[in-house]
Amino acid sequence: METFWFLLIAVLWTGYFVLEGFDFGVGILMPFVARGEAQRRTVVRTIGPVWDGNEVWLLVAGGATFAAFPEWYATLFSGFYLPLFLILLALILRGVALEYRNKSDSQKGWDRAFFWGSLGPAVLWGVAFANIAAGVPLDADHEYTGTLFTLLNPFALLGGLATLLLFAQHGAVFLALRTTGELRERARRIARVLGPLTVVAAAAFLVLLGSDKPAYWVITGVAAAALVASLLATVRGRDGWAFTGSALAIAALVAALFTALFPNVMPALDPANSLTITNAASSPYTLTVMTWVAVIFTPVVLVYQGWTYWVFRRRLTGA
């Protein structure tokens, strides 16, 4: 049961990063892809019907971690308090900006909030998961003993750069898929520039992380191939395939991280203090009840969200 919930939490984080990833990318790229208020409004409209639904994946992932692995949740949210607080603050800022930019006389201020509220989480999520995968200082009580600067190590910053580029490239191909005319062409040009940089950064991050598990290297190869395929599809004007490739690359990156983690959920620099799926899990009864709830309601959520994307599938025309 512990393994099932570890896999399910990995799936939830995958859904979050694949879907919220292009939201972050759109916010990061808006100052570079849009010219004039009409185009900026079109850029915002590409994610307008779906961005808040995409954030539900984060809430469910956090809630599932709290219920299934409370020890992991406690250590993570206490040790990573400041970075996670900054992510939360940025998400609030971005949400307010999206809701109020069309209700204010000062769109530029809200657009800056949209940009920074997208850029911050895109970097900080990479920093956080790089630290989780590589290991952090934990004591015998599973309490984090480092500082903020411990988390801002070179490898973690490389992880932040990798996710920033991944999400920006994902956002660029999403904009190319959802718009027409100048917006589409500008987004495609940006995607072609970001593609090679993303391949290098993501590959360097995954290679430096490393693992003795053969499955890890297979997944790493899938991530690299998906990024290259996305770039080739962008060059050929196949926006749908380009988006599929970037989505698969993000999913493979998350899968690689969780593969490297297993059976740990939060490795310590001293392996004796690591949190595992066994010593961090809730009781078997709790996990059983949660499993029934997940089996019943997860398909409902997936069908509803899939229907939402189908309804708002048409391209938008910007001035």
Image (cartoon, rainbow, N blue to C red):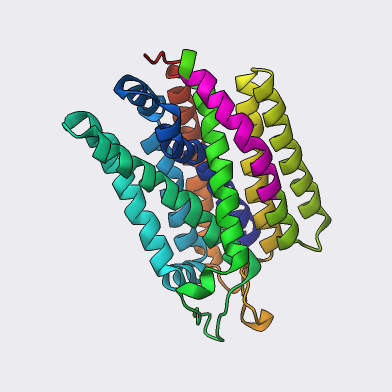
Instruction: Based on the picture, tell me whether residue 86 belongs to the magenta stretch.
Output: no
- Does the rendering let one see residue 227? yes
How many numbered marks appear? 0
Question: Residue drawn at (47%, 77%), measured in percent from left and top?
Answer: 147
The answer to which quarter of the image holds residue 241 is top right
| Residue 159 place in picture, x, y as percent | 60, 57
What are the residue bounds of the magenta stretch? 183-202
Q: Residue furthest right?
A: 214
Viewer-side residue, 53 vs 226: 226
Instruction: Based on the picture, tell me whether residue 186 belongs to the magenta stretch.
Output: yes
| Residue 119 place in picture, x, y as percent | 44, 47
When the figure is inspected, residue 156 is found, relative to residue 43, above or below; the finding is below
Question: Residue drawn at (35%, 51%), measured in percent from left and top?
Answer: 90
Question: Residue drawn at (46%, 24%), measured in percent from left and top?
Answer: 309
Question: Residue drawn at (61%, 21%), measured in percent from left and top?
Answer: 240
Task: State the quadrant of the N terminus.
Answer: bottom right
The answer to which quarter of the image holds residue 131 is bottom right
Q: Main secondary structure of the magenta part?
A: helix
Viewer-side residue, 31 vs 178: 31
Q: Residue furthest bottom?
A: 140
| Residue 100 place in picture, x, y as percent | 22, 35
| Residue 51 placement, left or right of 203 | left
When the figure is inspected, residue 235 is found, relative to residue 19, above or below; the finding is above
The answer to which quarter of the image holds residue 274 is bottom right
| Residue 99 placement, left or right of 21 | left
- Does the rendering let one see residue 177? no
Task: State the quadrant of the C terminus.
Answer: top left
| Residue 82 place in picture, x, y as percent | 39, 67
